[in-house]
Amino acid sequence: MRRDVITEATIDLGAIAHNTAVFAASTTAEVMAVVKANGFGHGALATAEAALAGGATWLGVATGAEALELRAAGVTAPILSWIHPHDGDLAEAVAADVDVSVSSVDHLASVASSGLTPNVHLKADTGLHRNGSVASDWPELVRRAREFEQYGRIRVRAVWSHLISGEDSEAEATRLQVTRFETALALARDAGLRPRLRHLANSVAALGTPVTHYDLVRPGIGLYGVEPDLRRTYGLRAAMTLRARLVLVKHVPAGSGVSYEHDYVTTRPTTLGLVPLGFADGVPRTAGPFAQVWCAGRRFPVAGRIAMDQFVVDFGEFTPAAGEDVVLFGSGADGEPTVGDWADWAGTIPHEIFTGIGARVRREHVGLPVPANQQRGEA
Ligand SMILES: *Cc1c(COP(=O)(O)O)cnc(C)c1O
Protein backbone atom coordinates (compact mmCIF):
# COMPACT_ATOMS: atom_id res chain seq x y z
CA MET A 1 0.00 0.00 0.00
CA ARG A 2 1.14 3.52 -0.77
CA ARG A 3 2.15 5.52 2.32
CA ASP A 4 -0.63 8.06 1.84
CA VAL A 5 -3.28 5.35 1.47
CA ILE A 6 -4.92 3.78 4.51
CA THR A 7 -7.62 1.62 2.89
CA GLU A 8 -7.24 -0.33 -0.29
CA ALA A 9 -8.83 -3.09 -2.34
CA THR A 10 -6.14 -4.74 -4.43
CA ILE A 11 -7.65 -6.37 -7.49
CA ASP A 12 -5.68 -9.04 -9.31
CA LEU A 13 -6.77 -8.71 -12.93
CA GLY A 14 -4.75 -11.80 -13.75
CA ALA A 15 -7.14 -13.74 -11.50
CA ILE A 16 -10.14 -12.30 -13.35
CA ALA A 17 -8.61 -13.24 -16.71
CA HIS A 18 -7.83 -16.72 -15.36
CA ASN A 19 -11.37 -17.18 -14.02
CA THR A 20 -12.83 -16.06 -17.34
CA ALA A 21 -10.67 -18.63 -19.08
CA VAL A 22 -12.03 -21.30 -16.72
CA PHE A 23 -15.53 -20.38 -17.87
CA ALA A 24 -14.49 -20.31 -21.52
CA ALA A 25 -12.94 -23.76 -21.15
CA SER A 26 -16.08 -25.18 -19.54
CA THR A 27 -18.34 -24.50 -22.53
CA THR A 28 -18.48 -24.18 -26.28
CA ALA A 29 -20.77 -21.17 -25.86
CA GLU A 30 -19.62 -17.55 -25.85
CA VAL A 31 -18.93 -15.91 -22.49
CA MET A 32 -20.65 -12.70 -21.42
CA ALA A 33 -18.73 -11.26 -18.46
CA VAL A 34 -21.21 -9.69 -16.05
CA VAL A 35 -19.60 -6.46 -14.86
CA LYS A 36 -22.67 -4.73 -13.38
CA ALA A 37 -22.38 -2.71 -10.16
CA ASN A 38 -18.86 -1.54 -10.94
CA GLY A 39 -17.72 -5.05 -11.73
CA PHE A 40 -19.14 -6.38 -8.45
CA GLY A 41 -17.07 -3.62 -6.79
CA HIS A 42 -13.86 -4.56 -8.61
CA GLY A 43 -13.97 -1.70 -11.13
CA ALA A 44 -16.15 -2.19 -14.21
CA LEU A 45 -13.67 -1.08 -16.81
CA ALA A 46 -10.60 -2.91 -15.54
CA THR A 47 -12.70 -6.03 -14.94
CA ALA A 48 -14.18 -5.82 -18.43
CA GLU A 49 -10.75 -5.55 -20.03
CA ALA A 50 -9.41 -8.46 -17.96
CA ALA A 51 -12.41 -10.64 -18.82
CA LEU A 52 -12.08 -9.83 -22.52
CA ALA A 53 -8.39 -10.74 -22.27
CA GLY A 54 -9.44 -14.02 -20.64
CA GLY A 55 -11.77 -15.00 -23.46
CA ALA A 56 -15.09 -13.24 -22.86
CA THR A 57 -16.70 -11.84 -26.03
CA TRP A 58 -19.65 -10.03 -24.44
CA LEU A 59 -20.19 -7.76 -21.44
CA GLY A 60 -23.35 -7.66 -19.35
CA VAL A 61 -24.52 -4.79 -17.14
CA ALA A 62 -27.74 -3.88 -15.38
CA THR A 63 -28.36 -0.31 -16.52
CA GLY A 64 -27.96 1.78 -19.63
CA ALA A 65 -25.77 4.19 -17.66
CA GLU A 66 -23.36 1.37 -16.80
CA ALA A 67 -23.15 0.41 -20.47
CA LEU A 68 -22.55 4.01 -21.54
CA GLU A 69 -19.72 4.33 -19.04
CA LEU A 70 -17.95 1.39 -20.68
CA ARG A 71 -18.56 2.81 -24.15
CA ALA A 72 -17.29 6.24 -23.08
CA ALA A 73 -14.09 4.57 -21.91
CA GLY A 74 -13.60 3.06 -25.34
CA VAL A 75 -14.90 -0.47 -24.85
CA THR A 76 -16.07 -1.78 -28.24
CA ALA A 77 -17.16 -5.33 -27.29
CA PRO A 78 -20.90 -6.07 -27.51
CA ILE A 79 -22.72 -5.04 -24.33
CA LEU A 80 -26.15 -6.05 -23.07
CA SER A 81 -27.99 -4.00 -20.44
CA TRP A 82 -31.13 -5.40 -18.83
CA ILE A 83 -32.84 -3.00 -16.46
CA HIS A 84 -34.71 -0.09 -18.03
CA PRO A 85 -37.75 1.99 -17.17
CA HIS A 86 -40.79 0.57 -18.96
CA ASP A 87 -41.21 3.72 -21.06
CA GLY A 88 -37.61 4.87 -20.86
CA ASP A 89 -35.72 6.73 -23.52
CA LEU A 90 -33.00 4.32 -24.52
CA ALA A 91 -31.86 6.29 -27.56
CA GLU A 92 -28.53 7.18 -26.02
CA ALA A 93 -27.68 3.57 -25.17
CA VAL A 94 -28.91 2.36 -28.53
CA ALA A 95 -26.90 5.04 -30.34
CA ALA A 96 -23.87 3.73 -28.46
CA ASP A 97 -24.58 0.27 -29.86
CA VAL A 98 -25.73 -1.22 -26.57
CA ASP A 99 -28.06 -4.20 -26.82
CA VAL A 100 -31.14 -3.84 -24.65
CA SER A 101 -33.30 -6.39 -22.89
CA VAL A 102 -37.05 -6.25 -23.41
CA SER A 103 -39.53 -7.90 -21.01
CA SER A 104 -42.88 -6.44 -22.05
CA VAL A 105 -44.79 -4.96 -24.97
CA ASP A 106 -44.44 -1.52 -23.30
CA HIS A 107 -40.67 -1.96 -23.27
CA LEU A 108 -40.75 -3.11 -26.83
CA ALA A 109 -42.76 -0.11 -28.03
CA SER A 110 -40.43 2.39 -26.39
CA VAL A 111 -37.31 0.63 -27.67
CA ALA A 112 -38.78 0.46 -31.18
CA SER A 113 -39.35 4.22 -31.19
CA SER A 114 -35.66 5.07 -30.86
CA GLY A 115 -35.40 5.98 -34.54
CA LEU A 116 -32.55 3.48 -34.88
CA THR A 117 -32.58 -0.29 -35.16
CA PRO A 118 -31.66 -1.49 -31.67
CA ASN A 119 -30.49 -5.01 -30.99
CA VAL A 120 -33.02 -6.51 -28.62
CA HIS A 121 -32.77 -9.51 -26.28
CA LEU A 122 -36.31 -10.68 -25.50
CA LYS A 123 -36.44 -11.91 -21.93
CA ALA A 124 -38.69 -14.76 -20.91
CA ASP A 125 -39.65 -15.31 -17.28
CA THR A 126 -39.07 -19.04 -16.81
CA GLY A 127 -39.79 -19.04 -13.09
CA LEU A 128 -37.68 -16.48 -11.25
CA HIS A 129 -40.62 -14.06 -11.47
CA ARG A 130 -38.35 -11.07 -11.42
CA ASN A 131 -37.75 -9.55 -14.86
CA GLY A 132 -38.94 -11.15 -18.10
CA SER A 133 -42.25 -11.84 -19.75
CA VAL A 134 -44.49 -14.48 -18.17
CA ALA A 135 -45.62 -17.31 -20.41
CA SER A 136 -49.13 -15.89 -20.85
CA ASP A 137 -47.72 -12.61 -22.28
CA TRP A 138 -44.94 -14.20 -24.35
CA PRO A 139 -46.88 -15.02 -27.57
CA GLU A 140 -48.01 -11.39 -27.89
CA LEU A 141 -44.48 -10.11 -27.14
CA VAL A 142 -42.84 -12.24 -29.83
CA ARG A 143 -45.61 -11.43 -32.34
CA ARG A 144 -45.16 -7.68 -31.83
CA ALA A 145 -41.38 -8.06 -31.85
CA ARG A 146 -41.55 -9.76 -35.22
CA GLU A 147 -43.74 -6.92 -36.55
CA PHE A 148 -41.31 -4.27 -35.38
CA GLU A 149 -38.46 -6.29 -36.83
CA GLN A 150 -40.18 -6.43 -40.22
CA TYR A 151 -40.57 -2.62 -40.12
CA GLY A 152 -36.82 -2.37 -39.41
CA ARG A 153 -37.43 -0.79 -36.01
CA ILE A 154 -35.64 -3.47 -33.96
CA ARG A 155 -33.48 -6.51 -34.54
CA VAL A 156 -34.12 -9.49 -32.24
CA ARG A 157 -30.61 -10.68 -31.52
CA ALA A 158 -31.43 -13.00 -28.62
CA VAL A 159 -33.99 -14.75 -26.50
CA TRP A 160 -32.92 -15.19 -22.91
CA SER A 161 -33.89 -15.88 -19.32
CA HIS A 162 -32.34 -16.08 -15.86
CA LEU A 163 -32.07 -19.00 -13.44
CA ILE A 164 -33.56 -19.29 -9.97
CA SER A 165 -30.53 -20.95 -8.39
CA GLY A 166 -27.19 -19.19 -8.18
CA GLU A 167 -25.57 -21.89 -6.05
CA ASP A 168 -26.74 -25.34 -7.06
CA SER A 169 -25.71 -26.79 -10.42
CA GLU A 170 -28.23 -29.59 -9.98
CA ALA A 171 -31.17 -27.52 -8.76
CA GLU A 172 -34.50 -29.16 -9.50
CA ALA A 173 -35.86 -25.83 -10.71
CA THR A 174 -33.24 -25.58 -13.44
CA ARG A 175 -34.62 -28.52 -15.41
CA LEU A 176 -38.09 -27.02 -15.32
CA GLN A 177 -36.69 -23.66 -16.44
CA VAL A 178 -34.90 -25.28 -19.39
CA THR A 179 -38.21 -26.83 -20.46
CA ARG A 180 -40.00 -23.50 -20.21
CA PHE A 181 -37.15 -21.80 -22.06
CA GLU A 182 -37.46 -24.34 -24.88
CA THR A 183 -41.17 -23.51 -25.13
CA ALA A 184 -40.41 -19.78 -25.29
CA LEU A 185 -37.81 -20.41 -28.01
CA ALA A 186 -40.27 -22.49 -30.04
CA LEU A 187 -42.92 -19.77 -29.80
CA ALA A 188 -40.39 -17.14 -30.89
CA ARG A 189 -39.55 -19.29 -33.87
CA ASP A 190 -43.23 -19.82 -34.69
CA ALA A 191 -43.62 -16.03 -34.69
CA GLY A 192 -40.94 -15.84 -37.36
CA LEU A 193 -38.04 -14.73 -35.16
CA ARG A 194 -34.56 -16.15 -35.78
CA PRO A 195 -32.46 -14.91 -32.86
CA ARG A 196 -28.76 -15.63 -33.24
CA LEU A 197 -28.30 -16.11 -29.48
CA ARG A 198 -30.08 -18.00 -26.74
CA HIS A 199 -28.78 -17.54 -23.19
CA LEU A 200 -29.74 -18.71 -19.74
CA ALA A 201 -26.75 -19.70 -17.56
CA ASN A 202 -25.29 -17.78 -14.58
CA SER A 203 -21.94 -18.73 -12.98
CA VAL A 204 -23.02 -21.94 -11.32
CA ALA A 205 -24.81 -23.24 -14.40
CA ALA A 206 -22.01 -22.15 -16.73
CA LEU A 207 -19.62 -24.38 -14.79
CA GLY A 208 -21.83 -27.29 -13.82
CA THR A 209 -25.00 -27.47 -15.94
CA PRO A 210 -24.17 -27.86 -19.66
CA VAL A 211 -27.84 -28.17 -20.70
CA THR A 212 -28.23 -24.47 -19.85
CA HIS A 213 -25.36 -23.20 -22.00
CA TYR A 214 -27.03 -22.67 -25.39
CA ASP A 215 -25.04 -20.01 -27.31
CA LEU A 216 -23.76 -17.84 -24.49
CA VAL A 217 -23.23 -18.03 -20.71
CA ARG A 218 -23.35 -15.08 -18.30
CA PRO A 219 -20.98 -15.57 -15.34
CA GLY A 220 -20.81 -12.88 -12.67
CA ILE A 221 -19.62 -13.92 -9.20
CA GLY A 222 -17.31 -16.66 -10.47
CA LEU A 223 -15.27 -14.16 -12.47
CA TYR A 224 -14.29 -12.54 -9.20
CA GLY A 225 -13.06 -15.83 -7.77
CA VAL A 226 -15.95 -16.98 -5.61
CA GLU A 227 -16.75 -20.65 -6.18
CA PRO A 228 -20.47 -20.54 -6.98
CA ASP A 229 -21.33 -24.24 -6.65
CA LEU A 230 -22.24 -25.77 -3.29
CA ARG A 231 -21.26 -29.14 -4.73
CA ARG A 232 -17.73 -28.68 -6.07
CA THR A 233 -14.92 -26.26 -6.85
CA TYR A 234 -13.36 -25.29 -10.17
CA GLY A 235 -10.02 -23.69 -9.31
CA LEU A 236 -11.26 -20.11 -9.41
CA ARG A 237 -8.89 -17.52 -7.95
CA ALA A 238 -9.98 -14.73 -5.61
CA ALA A 239 -9.33 -11.38 -7.28
CA MET A 240 -9.76 -8.96 -4.40
CA THR A 241 -7.79 -8.39 -1.21
CA LEU A 242 -9.27 -5.78 1.13
CA ARG A 243 -6.81 -4.24 3.55
CA ALA A 244 -6.24 -1.23 5.73
CA ARG A 245 -3.40 0.30 7.67
CA LEU A 246 -3.72 0.51 11.46
CA VAL A 247 -4.03 4.17 12.34
CA LEU A 248 -3.61 3.79 16.12
CA VAL A 249 -2.33 1.14 18.52
CA LYS A 250 -2.84 1.41 22.29
CA HIS A 251 -2.65 -0.64 25.48
CA VAL A 252 -5.67 -0.79 27.77
CA PRO A 253 -6.30 -2.47 31.13
CA ALA A 254 -8.70 -5.35 31.80
CA GLY A 255 -12.32 -4.19 32.04
CA SER A 256 -12.09 -1.63 29.22
CA GLY A 257 -15.29 -1.35 27.19
CA VAL A 258 -14.65 -0.98 23.47
CA SER A 259 -16.69 0.95 20.88
CA TYR A 260 -20.32 2.09 21.08
CA GLU A 261 -22.42 0.84 23.96
CA HIS A 262 -19.49 -1.23 25.27
CA ASP A 263 -20.79 -4.55 23.95
CA TYR A 264 -17.20 -5.73 24.22
CA VAL A 265 -15.21 -5.49 27.45
CA THR A 266 -11.58 -6.59 27.67
CA THR A 267 -10.96 -9.46 30.08
CA ARG A 268 -7.22 -8.80 30.46
CA PRO A 269 -4.75 -6.05 29.78
CA THR A 270 -4.57 -6.00 26.01
CA THR A 271 -3.50 -4.16 22.89
CA LEU A 272 -6.12 -2.56 20.66
CA GLY A 273 -5.59 -1.49 17.05
CA LEU A 274 -7.80 0.91 15.12
CA VAL A 275 -8.77 -0.04 11.54
CA PRO A 276 -9.98 2.90 9.41
CA LEU A 277 -12.80 1.02 7.67
CA GLY A 278 -16.44 0.98 8.72
CA PHE A 279 -19.89 0.25 7.47
CA ALA A 280 -19.75 3.30 5.20
CA ASP A 281 -16.97 1.43 3.42
CA GLY A 282 -19.03 -1.74 3.24
CA VAL A 283 -17.70 -3.55 6.30
CA PRO A 284 -20.95 -5.04 7.57
CA ARG A 285 -21.90 -3.93 11.06
CA THR A 286 -23.67 -7.22 11.72
CA ALA A 287 -20.40 -9.13 11.28
CA GLY A 288 -18.88 -7.42 14.34
CA PRO A 289 -19.42 -10.15 16.97
CA PHE A 290 -17.89 -12.86 14.72
CA ALA A 291 -15.40 -11.14 12.46
CA GLN A 292 -11.64 -11.60 12.41
CA VAL A 293 -8.84 -9.87 10.54
CA TRP A 294 -5.39 -11.03 9.47
CA CYS A 295 -2.27 -9.28 10.73
CA ALA A 296 1.37 -10.39 10.89
CA GLY A 297 0.45 -13.94 9.93
CA ARG A 298 -2.37 -14.47 12.47
CA ARG A 299 -6.07 -13.88 12.91
CA PHE A 300 -7.36 -11.46 15.55
CA PRO A 301 -10.96 -10.70 16.56
CA VAL A 302 -12.85 -7.50 15.95
CA ALA A 303 -13.60 -5.87 19.33
CA GLY A 304 -17.00 -4.26 19.78
CA ARG A 305 -19.25 -2.60 17.28
CA ILE A 306 -18.15 -1.74 13.77
CA ALA A 307 -18.76 1.98 13.35
CA MET A 308 -19.31 4.06 10.24
CA ASP A 309 -15.66 4.78 9.55
CA GLN A 310 -13.65 2.53 11.85
CA PHE A 311 -13.50 -0.54 14.03
CA VAL A 312 -11.18 -1.90 16.70
CA VAL A 313 -9.20 -5.14 16.77
CA ASP A 314 -8.14 -6.91 19.98
CA PHE A 315 -4.54 -8.01 19.53
CA GLY A 316 -4.12 -9.51 23.00
CA GLU A 317 -0.45 -9.84 23.91
CA PHE A 318 0.73 -8.99 20.41
CA THR A 319 1.67 -5.41 19.68
CA PRO A 320 1.47 -4.51 15.99
CA ALA A 321 3.23 -1.43 14.73
CA ALA A 322 1.10 1.62 14.07
CA GLY A 323 0.76 1.65 10.30
CA GLU A 324 0.89 -2.13 10.04
CA ASP A 325 -1.29 -3.75 7.37
CA VAL A 326 -4.45 -5.57 8.38
CA VAL A 327 -6.14 -7.81 5.80
CA LEU A 328 -9.93 -8.10 6.09
CA PHE A 329 -10.17 -10.67 3.34
CA GLY A 330 -8.11 -12.19 0.57
CA SER A 331 -7.68 -15.52 -1.16
CA GLY A 332 -7.48 -17.42 2.12
CA ALA A 333 -4.33 -19.18 0.93
CA ASP A 334 -2.27 -18.05 3.93
CA GLY A 335 -5.08 -18.38 6.46
CA GLU A 336 -6.57 -14.93 6.09
CA PRO A 337 -10.36 -14.65 6.05
CA THR A 338 -12.13 -14.77 2.67
CA VAL A 339 -15.02 -12.74 1.36
CA GLY A 340 -17.10 -15.86 2.04
CA ASP A 341 -16.13 -15.69 5.73
CA TRP A 342 -17.32 -12.08 5.91
CA ALA A 343 -20.52 -13.03 4.13
CA ASP A 344 -21.14 -15.80 6.67
CA TRP A 345 -20.38 -13.50 9.63
CA ALA A 346 -22.82 -10.95 8.25
CA GLY A 347 -25.49 -13.46 7.21
CA THR A 348 -25.25 -12.52 3.55
CA ILE A 349 -23.53 -13.54 0.30
CA PRO A 350 -20.16 -12.46 -1.15
CA HIS A 351 -21.94 -10.44 -3.85
CA GLU A 352 -23.28 -8.06 -1.19
CA ILE A 353 -19.90 -7.71 0.51
CA PHE A 354 -18.16 -6.90 -2.79
CA THR A 355 -20.73 -4.43 -4.02
CA GLY A 356 -20.93 -2.72 -0.64
CA ILE A 357 -17.30 -1.65 -0.69
CA GLY A 358 -17.47 2.11 -0.82
CA ALA A 359 -15.87 4.82 -2.89
CA ARG A 360 -13.45 5.80 -0.09
CA VAL A 361 -11.61 2.52 -0.59
CA ARG A 362 -8.94 2.96 -3.20
CA ARG A 363 -8.95 0.29 -5.92
CA GLU A 364 -5.47 -0.80 -6.95
CA HIS A 365 -5.44 -2.95 -10.07
CA VAL A 366 -2.52 -5.32 -10.49
CA GLY A 367 -1.66 -8.41 -12.49
CA LEU A 368 -2.37 -7.14 -16.02
CA PRO A 369 -1.41 -3.91 -17.72
CA VAL A 370 -4.14 -1.34 -17.13
CA PRO A 371 -4.52 1.41 -19.72
CA ALA A 372 -4.05 4.91 -18.34
CA ASN A 373 -7.70 5.93 -18.83
CA GLN A 374 -8.79 3.10 -16.55
CA GLN A 375 -6.39 4.06 -13.78
CA ARG A 376 -7.82 7.57 -13.84
CA GLY A 377 -11.42 6.40 -13.95
CA GLU A 378 -11.24 3.94 -11.14
CA ALA A 379 -8.66 5.22 -8.69
C1 LIG B 1 -26.14 -10.82 -11.98
C2 LIG B 1 -26.61 -11.58 -13.14
C3 LIG B 1 -25.84 -12.63 -13.69
C4 LIG B 1 -24.61 -13.18 -13.01
O1 LIG B 1 -25.02 -14.10 -12.01
P1 LIG B 1 -23.94 -14.85 -11.10
O2 LIG B 1 -24.74 -15.78 -10.26
O3 LIG B 1 -23.26 -13.77 -10.32
O4 LIG B 1 -23.04 -15.53 -12.04
C5 LIG B 1 -26.27 -13.20 -14.87
N1 LIG B 1 -27.42 -12.79 -15.46
C6 LIG B 1 -28.19 -11.81 -14.94
C7 LIG B 1 -29.45 -11.41 -15.62
C8 LIG B 1 -27.83 -11.18 -13.76
O5 LIG B 1 -28.61 -10.22 -13.25
Image (cartoon, helix red, strand yellow):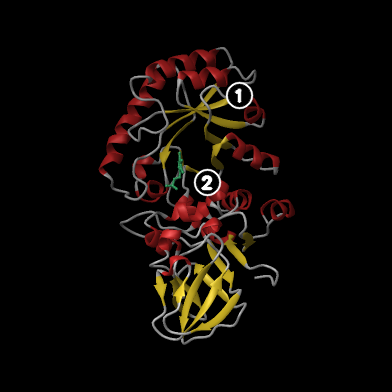
Point out the quarter of the image occupied by ligand 1: top left
Percent across and percent down for residue 355 are 51, 51
Q: Amino acid at mark 1?
A: Asp
Q: Is residue 127 left or right of residue 251?
A: left
Q: Residue furthest left?
A: 172
Name the residue: 58% across, 62% down.
Answer: 9
Q: Is residue 177 left or right of residue 37?
A: left
**Can residue 39 be seen by looking at this rendering?**
yes
Q: Name the residue carrying label 2.
A: 33
Closer to the camera in the image, 263 or 361: 263
**Can residue 35 be seen by looking at this rendering?**
no
Q: Can you tell which of label 2 and label 1 is closer to the viewer?
A: 1
Q: Is residue 49 above or below residue 233?
A: above
* Some atom of ligand 1 lies within 8 Å of the CB belonging to the residue at label 2: no
Q: Is residue 137 left or right of residue 82?
A: left
Percent across and percent down for residue 42 are 57, 54
Q: Is residue 132 above or below residue 209?
A: above
Badge 2 marks a residue whose secondary structure is strand
Badge 1 marks a residue whose secondary structure is loop
Name the residue: 71% across, 54% down.
Answer: 371
* Some atom of ligand 1 lies within 8 Å of the CB belonging to the residue at label 1: no
Q: Is residue 267 above or below residue 373?
A: below
Q: Name the residue carrying label 1.
A: 89
Percent across and percent down for residue 239 are 53, 61
Between discs 2 and 1, the one toward the N terminus: 2
Identify the image quadrant of residue 118. top right
Quadrant of the drawing holding the N terminus: bottom right
Q: Amino acid at mark 2?
A: Ala
Q: How many marks?
A: 2
Q: CA distance from mark 2 to mark 1?
A: 25 Å
Percent across and percent down for residue 375 are 70, 56
